[in-house]
Each structure stands twice: as C-alpha cells, then as structure tokens.
Image (spheres, grey):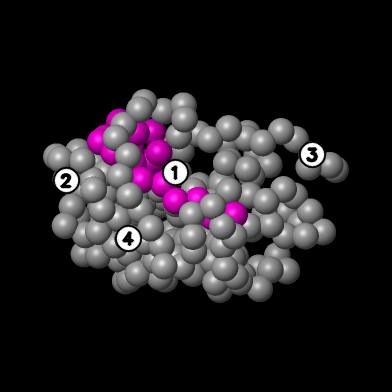
C-alpha cells in the first residue's frame, strides 16, 4: 500500500478564529524535528514516550482554564490522530513540565486530568508515523478556555473533547514539531 497523498490541511485554519498567544518548549523548537524522547516506544521505535515541556503566556483576558492537546493531522486516517489531551488546567498554571503526560495524572497540576487519546490510553502517546511516510506534524496546542471545568468524563473520546474545547476556546497557542521514520 502506498502512503502517497497530498498534505493534510491545518485543522485549526478551519475553526472559528480566536486570538493567538505564545507557547514555547525547551524540549524542541517550533518547526523543527522532535527529539527521540517524544517518540512512541513501540512498533520498532525506541523513543522515550515522554511529553515535552511547554510554557505559555499572553492568554486572552477572561481565561478561566486551559486544555493542552497534541494532534497529528498527517496520520493516514480521515480524522488525523490525537496523541494527548489534558483538560482542567487552572488559569494560574502557565507551564507543564516534560513528562507531565505520564498516565495516572500524578504529574499534572491539581484539578487537571487526561482524556483518552487515539491510542486508547489516558496520557501522552508519542510520535508514531508509519515507516516511510512523510514527516508528520505534531501540533501541541494550548487552548485558553472560558471555563475551568468542561464537565468531560475521563472516558470522553478525543473528537468529542475537541468539539467541546472549540465551543469554549477564547485563544489558542500552537507549537509544531515534526517526526519521520525512514523506510
């Protein structure tokens, strides 16, 4: 099977426009390749499966909480692939340390919790593009929300969570890393 296809669109270009703010990572540079620490440790890949550190600033006035996601729009599916979803981050928190995506929520700020990724687990699932495919974009997004509690159960599917986040988003900060597995 060939994986040749056009580049997927940036899904955030098709959502209601909201103010942008800043997110940075000491783990990687926006637009650069992601280090092996953030690669899924399976399928023949030897990564650390650790979420990167993220720091953000400049969220819009009225922000009451945050959600953080990692989405791969280049996954060879009609709906991309959700690698990480954290909700319930208090408005006074402006960073997550490396490894905050460890399953079990222990490394998250008080009140924050993971929802199920497309891996079917509650925690960060690292980069895992098919061997020989194009370099995939991993969009780490901080969503500034108009609520500190979206009322989502831990079992909420990723697509449903994204829909709910969109309805509460006041601002958005995006940093993108790339990863490719050579054939």
Circles 3, 1 touching at the beta carbon (< 8 Å): no
Q: CA distance from mark 1 to mark 4?
A: 26 Å
Does residue 88 belong to the magenta stretch?
Answer: no
Sooner in the amino-acid sequence: mark 3 or mark 4: 3
Q: Secondary structure at mark 4?
A: strand
Q: CA distance from mark 4 to mark 2?
A: 17 Å
Q: Secondary structure at mark 3?
A: loop
Q: Residue shown at 47%/30% (left/top)?
A: 13
Q: CA distance from mark 2 to mark 3?
A: 42 Å
Q: Nearer the viewer, mark 4 or mark 2?
A: 4
Q: How busy is the neighbourhood of tag 4: few (under 14 within 10 Å), some, or many (20 plus)?
A: some
Q: Which mark is residue 64?
A: 2
Q: Residue shown at 45%/44% (left/top)?
A: 158
How far across and how far down the image is residue 42, in percent? 66, 68
> Please, which residue is most extreme toward the right here?
1
Q: Nearer the viewer, mark 3 or mark 4?
A: 4
How far across and how far down the image is residue 8, in percent? 62, 35
When the figure is inspected, residue 149 is found, relative to residue 113, above or below; the finding is: above
Q: Residue shown at 82%/59% (left/top)?
A: 183
* Residue picked out by circle 4: 55
How far across and how far down the image is residue 45, in percent? 68, 68
* Residue picked out by circle 3: 4
* Residue picked out by circle 1: 157
Q: CA distance from mark 1 to mark 2?
A: 23 Å
Q: How busy is the neighbourhood of tag 1: few (under 14 within 10 Å), some, or many (20 plus)?
A: some
How far across and how far down the image is residue 69, in percent? 41, 50
């Amino acid at each position: 099977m060939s994986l040749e296809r056009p580049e997927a669109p940036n899904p955030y270009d098709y959502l209601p426009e909201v103010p942008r703010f800043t997110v940075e990572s000491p783990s990687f540079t926006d637009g650069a390749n992601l280090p092996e620490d953030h690669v899924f440790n399976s399928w023949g890949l030897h990564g650390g499966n650790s979420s990167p550190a993220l720091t953000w600033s400049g969220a819009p006035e009225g922000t009451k909480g945050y959600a953080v996601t990692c989405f791969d729009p280049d996954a060879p599916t009609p709906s991309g692939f959700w690698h990480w979803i954290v909700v319930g981050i208090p408005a006074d928190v402006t960073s997550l340390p490396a490894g905050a995506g460890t399953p079990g929520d222990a490394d998250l700020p008080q009140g924050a919790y993971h929802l199920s990724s497309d891996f079917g687990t509650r925690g960060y699932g690292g980069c895992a593009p098919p061997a020989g495919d194009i370099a995939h974009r991993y969009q780490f997004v901080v969503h500034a929300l108009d609520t500190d509690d979206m009322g989502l159960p831990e079992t909420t599917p990723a697509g449903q969570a994204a829909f709910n986040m969109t309805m509460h988003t006041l601002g958005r900060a995006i940093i993108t890393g790339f990863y490719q597995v050579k054939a």
